[in-house]
Image: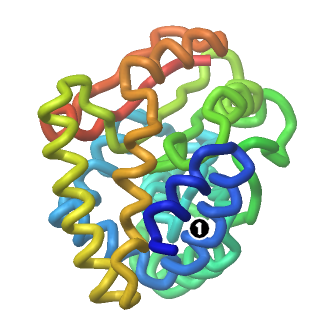
Amino acid sequence: MTGRPHLETSLSTPDGKSRYVRRLFATIADRYDLITVLLSYGRDAAWKRRLVALAGVRPGTKALDLACGTGDIAFALAADCAHVVGLDITPRMVELAKKKGTVTFLRNAKKGDCPLFLVGDMLALPFPDRAFDLVTTGYGIRNVPDIDAALSEVRRVLRPGGLFLSLDFNRPANALVRAVYLSYLTAVGSAVGWALHRDPDTYRYIPESIKRYPGAEAVVARLEAQGFDSARFLPVLGGLMAIHEAKA
């Protein structure tokens, strides 16, 4: 059997997607930082800086960064003097984030405390209601098996008036643009997958997940359905990416 039927079958159900994503990110964790640079042509850091700037962090802001990966957004929020918890479902990602905090953050940051990193599931957040002023995520919503359940959990842990920010790939509405975009991600992802893992299907998950993603406008509607206010998205990279913003 080729990788294609396996991937498509795995993503066809919430349980299948959950298992696939857990295996995938455990496989790529040690190369995650390199991958984000390669697949974004070095723009990933700038996109995350834009998200952090939108957060308007003040000293003492209680922030939760979901699908935190190796901690880029969490560290940036902490450098602005937020009290940050980073959560990821992949234990190796959390381990790497902790190491990065010890080696990089504590050595170079001029202010703020190092984030606390935990292993946990976005669909069942281990925090009480109204625990945070700010919730962020980079590439998290597209990867969960149930977007509505994840957004419901985000709203639950935000205080009234708290802010949610999410950076992710978009699913372009224009069919031609979407086809070119997905073809590009498939070609580049296949090349990177072969170079790093000798498996061209490793990063074909990204375009396959985008095919099933409702798109930025539909995510705004889902945010509103979960009771968020002032929900909107900001186009990034000509609309190929998007930052969502909403208030609890």
Q: Which residue is nearer to you in this view: 67 or 110?
A: 67
Instruction: Say which residue appears at 39% left-offset and 43% top-offset.
Output: 210
In this rendering, the answer to whether 48 lies above or below 240 is below
Q: Amino acid at mark 1?
A: Cys
Mark 1, secondary structure of its residue: loop
From the viewer's perspective, tell me whether residue 84 is left or right of residue 126. left
Instruction: Say which residue appears at 49% left-offset and 78% top-offset.
Output: 28
Q: Position of residue 57 (x, y in %)?
A: 46, 39
Q: Which residue is nearer to you in this view: 183 or 141?
A: 183
From the viewer's perspective, tell me whether residue 161 is left or right of residue 174. right
Q: Position of residue 58 (x, y in %)?
A: 49, 38
Instruction: Say which residue appears at 32% left-offset and 36% top-offset.
Output: 170
Q: Position of residue 165 (x, y in %)?
A: 47, 34
Q: Which residue is nearer to you in this view: 134 or 187?
A: 187
Q: Is residue 167 visible?
A: yes
Can you identify the residue that label 1 sits on? 114
Q: Which residue is nearer to you in this view: 217 or 37?
A: 217
Q: Is residue 111 visible?
A: no
In this rendering, the answer to whether 62 lies above or below 16 is above
Instruction: Say which residue appears at 33% left-offset and 73% top-offset.
Output: 35
Q: Position of residue 81 (x, y in %)?
A: 51, 52
From the viewer's perspective, tell me whether residue 206 is left or right of residue 94. left
